[in-house]
Amino acid sequence: MRRLLLLGMLLLSGLGLQAATITVTVDSTRYQTITGFGAAACWGAMRPMDDVEVIKLLYGPDSPVGLNIVRMEISPNMKGDITAADIGWDTPYDWHGYLNVVKEAKRRGAILYACPWSPPGEYKTNGISGGGNSEEQGYQKGELRTDCYDKFFDWLNTFLVYMRTNKANVDVVSLQNEPDWWVSYSGCLYTPEQLHDLVLKSARRLKKTTYQVKLMTAESLNYNPKYSDALLNDPETAKYFDMTGGHLYGKAPLDYMATAAVKARELGKEVWMTEHSVENDKQRDGLPTWHEELLFAEELNESMLAGANAYVYWYMMAHWSFVGTGEAQHQPGCDYGKLLRRGYVMSHFSKNLTGSTRLGATASVKTGTNSAFETSAYVKGDSLIVMAIDTTKNALDLKLVLPYKVKGGEHLLSTEEAVCQQQAIELGEPVSEVTVSAPARSLNTYIFQIDREATGIEQHAMPATASPAYYNLQGIRLNSPQGLTIERQADGSTRKTIMR
């Protein structure tokens, strides 16, 4: 009789109650490949990062977090000649201010992705880099003038030249940060139709081949599909793009982003989530609670289920981010340069899923006590990876039904008491069914080694990527992407329901 020995298994909390059992069935169907995870190289009032030690802490496979994408702003003022009075902040925009940190990130294997918040003010209808939504700016909505469409792409080329000259080649550039959000800071408004016209008339001027750069669609505030569809539905504009981009403000991953991913997948474009902050309760000071950290893990997991190839967080330094800013007097525990708990949560995904391919997975959950359970699965070389998130107070036993026989592995476990504990999973012989534990309120990554000989597969025999697919929070496959509601329960846990 096969036996499973899971070393270092935590005892069930409480009075020794029997844990509920959930069966997670993983199949061999392949979906998107995970390009990676990252954050923006800025902090405070969008100030460029200038501390390479923070980059060393976050980037590279040997770092504690393992990020591999870094985001930077393409400032509308190349030489930093805008004054603090112009923007109301204590530091001007620039390009050179990012150089030290992005070069360090590139040395550590990072993808450098750059985004304009605004074109230069002289190209816009309101004449300034600001979005125009303030009394001082006359509430004049800033839009790109149609006679400056060519100049816009020439300006992007100038930026690419500057970065290459300074040995910080850019890998990805997007059209615009949040074209659907009217702001007082640096910003530019576009309708989907205006972006279509901009690309149709002038995108040929972007020297993609010369600078070996990929082009991303504009990054809508909440991944509104109208913005990507307008560019991808027309073959004459779709041909310029390599990926879609967008943010998650106000919309969960399995809503707009999953919808936008449909067309992108049909055309072979990648889907990137390029900015979001999962902040703590506005009514409470301090670092995020453990429950809020698990909600962040759920967002990461749901982004993968929605079809994302990449997830890029907002500031890399903040009390609600990965590295402390020194706000210890206001946020105890947020010491400058300290790797915060959220960084370790991110590492479950960034260190293990980058380069993997998502597999199909379903879970036998029931409405009520374990309906908040989330899962997803991946293959990476000879590794089979299963993610499991339990936000409730109830411990679980997981019966994993796997598509390949495995011969042991590792359980990476994070709980409120300790993050990133490593526990060995030892198997007496290759098996395709394994029972493991998921303690209450925990984030779990199970990494198994595939036994190819016992499974009877060869490297080239692994299945190819499948057509687009959509899953609910429990990993159950859906016919189409559907909305999401979140109900907070009395014990602090969440209960989520897919709206049909």
Image (cartoon, grey):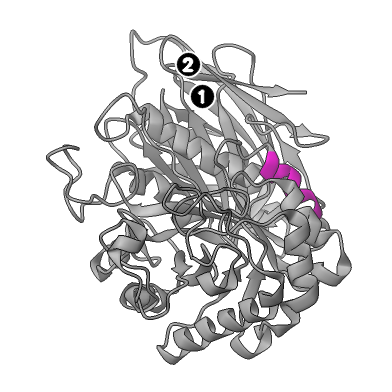
User: Which of the 4 image quadrants contains residue 45?
Assistant: bottom left
Residue 317 location, x and y as percent? Answer: 31, 53
Q: Is residue 257 magenta?
A: yes
Image side of residue 380 versus residue 58, left or right: right
Going by the numbered disc 1, the residue's amino acid type is: Asp
Which residue does the image show at 61% across and 46% down from the upper left?
304
Q: Residues within 10 Å of mark 2 (few under 14, many from 20)?
A: some
Instruction: Give whichever of discs 1 and 2 has the lower sequence position.
Output: 2
Residue 397 numbered mark, or none: 1
Q: Mark number for residue 19?
A: 2
Q: Nearer the viewer, residue 491 or 404?
A: 491
Residue 161 at x, y = what percent?
51, 88
Quadrant occupied by the C terminus? top right
Magenta part of the protein: which range? 256-265
Task: Kindly report the distance in space between the C-alpha atoms of the residues bearing marks 1 and 2.
Answer: 6 Å
Q: Main secondary structure of the magenta part?
A: helix
Q: Residues within 10 Å of mark 1 (few under 14, many from 20)?
A: some
Q: Do callouts 1 and 2 mark residues in contact (Cβ within 8 Å)?
A: yes
Q: Quadrant of residue 285?
A: top left
**Percent coordinates x, y for residue 351 in the rendering:** 44, 56
What amino acid is at disc 2?
A: Ala
Q: Is residue 462 visible?
A: no
Residue 22 vs 36, above or below: the answer is above
The one nearer the camera, 131 or 29, is 131
Is 436 placed above or below 452 here?
Answer: above
Residue at 37% x, 81% y is 79
